[in-house]
Image (cartoon, helix red, strand yellow):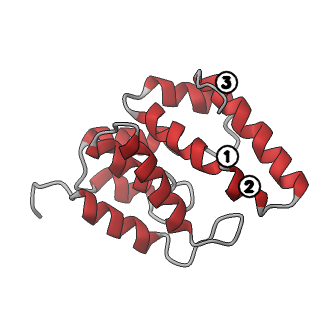
Amino acid sequence: MTDRALTLLEVEALARSAHEGQTDKAGRPYAEHLAAVAEGVRLRGGTPEQQAAAWLHDAIEDHALAPDWLETAALPEGVKSMVLALTKIPGEPVEEYTARILATEGALLVKEADLAHNADPARLAVLDGPTRDRLSAKYTYVRSLLGLPTP
């Protein structure tokens, strides 16, 4: 095994492969969401480590990659910490989840980009009314807990 960390392109390829066949709530390939979040992080001035975390932010939560994979992955500790912070734990109160994000260096910017893409009006428009309303309220609440302005 080499001591070098995965490059950003390698992380992207890994994330795309791990999420192969998964779709979002609108039926779109899940990798489109990951790409949008990574690009949102880049446009917000995020570091390569934050961009890597963006590609992997749902990998553990969505069971695309195993938690023990992350432990031994050739990734900087900062990326691993952000991915773990951004991984929702089943049954965990949203207040604890957001507190963990706030306590983890770099994770807030990734979550901000994630929320921005999730709440994109064009993305929400294809959902049924009750789902759209439920998710919009959820994203607004999470933004408030994170101290992010409502777009």
Q: CA distance from mark 1 to mark 3?
A: 14 Å
Classify mark 3: residues with Cα within 10 Å, few (<14), some (14-19) or many (20+). few
Q: Is residue 127 above or below residue 81?
A: below
Q: Earlier in the sequence, mark 1 or mark 3?
A: 1
Residue 105 picture quarter: top left
Front residue of 125 and 88: 125
Q: CA distance from mark 2 to mark 3?
A: 19 Å
Q: Residue at x 36, y 59 (%)?
A: 69
The total number of labels drawn is 3
Q: Position of residue 80 (x, y in %)?
A: 34, 44
At label 1, the amino acid type is Ala
The answer to whether the residues at label 1 and label 2 have Cβ atoms under 8 Å apart is yes
Q: Residue at x 73, y 30 (%)?
A: 141
Q: Is residue 136 visible?
A: yes
Q: Which mark is residue 144?
A: 3
Q: Which residue is mark 2?
A: 124
Q: CA distance from mark 1 to mark 2?
A: 7 Å
